[in-house]
Image (cartoon, rainbow, N blue to C red):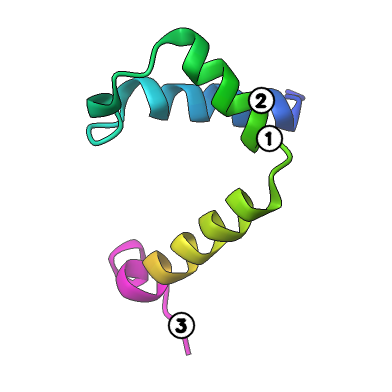
Amino acid sequence: MNIDPRQAFRVFMKYQLENGEGITGLRLNEEDIEKFLYGVEDDMLFYSKLDDFLKEFIEDFGENYGIELD
């Protein structure tokens, strides 16, 4: 199964924006979500922040998922 990485990103992010507990408080409508998705798709700052979050999360909680860091 081949899936376009951009489409996969958009589907995942749309799901998060529509269903994320903290994000739903923003009351984003469909147009807002599409604007955000279009904007962050190529935004290196977004990916840098996401990378920082994932790194920190894995460092803090990776053992919960069987990840042993040196």
Residue lying farthest top?
Answer: 30
Q: Which residue is drawn at 48% across and 22% down?
A: 14
User: Element at badge 1?
Assistant: loop
Of mark 2 and mark 3, the one earlier in the sequence is: 2
| Residue 65 covered by magenta stretch | yes
Residue 50 position, x and y percent, is 52, 54
How crowded pointer 3 is (Cα within 10 Å; few <14, some 14-19, many 20+) is rated as: few
Residue 58 position, x and y percent, is 41, 68
- Determine contact: label 2, label 1, CB under 8 Å: yes
C-alpha gap between disc 2 and disc 3: 35 Å
How crowded pointer 2 is (Cα within 10 Å; few <14, some 14-19, many 20+) is rated as: few
User: Element at badge 2?
Assistant: helix
C-alpha gap between disc 2 and disc 1: 6 Å
Q: Mark 2 points at which residue?
A: 38
User: Element at badge 3?
Assistant: loop
Count of numbered circles in the view: 3
Q: Residue 41 carries which label?
A: 1
- Determine contact: label 2, label 3, CB under 8 Å: no
Q: Name the residue under label 3.
A: 69
Q: What residue type is labelled 2?
A: Tyr
Residue 35 position, x and y percent, is 58, 20
Residue 17 left/right relative to 34: left
Front in this rendered view, residue 54 or 31: 31
Q: Give the range drawn in magenta.
A: 59-70
Residue 48 left/right relative to 65: right
Residue 45 left/right relative to 66: right
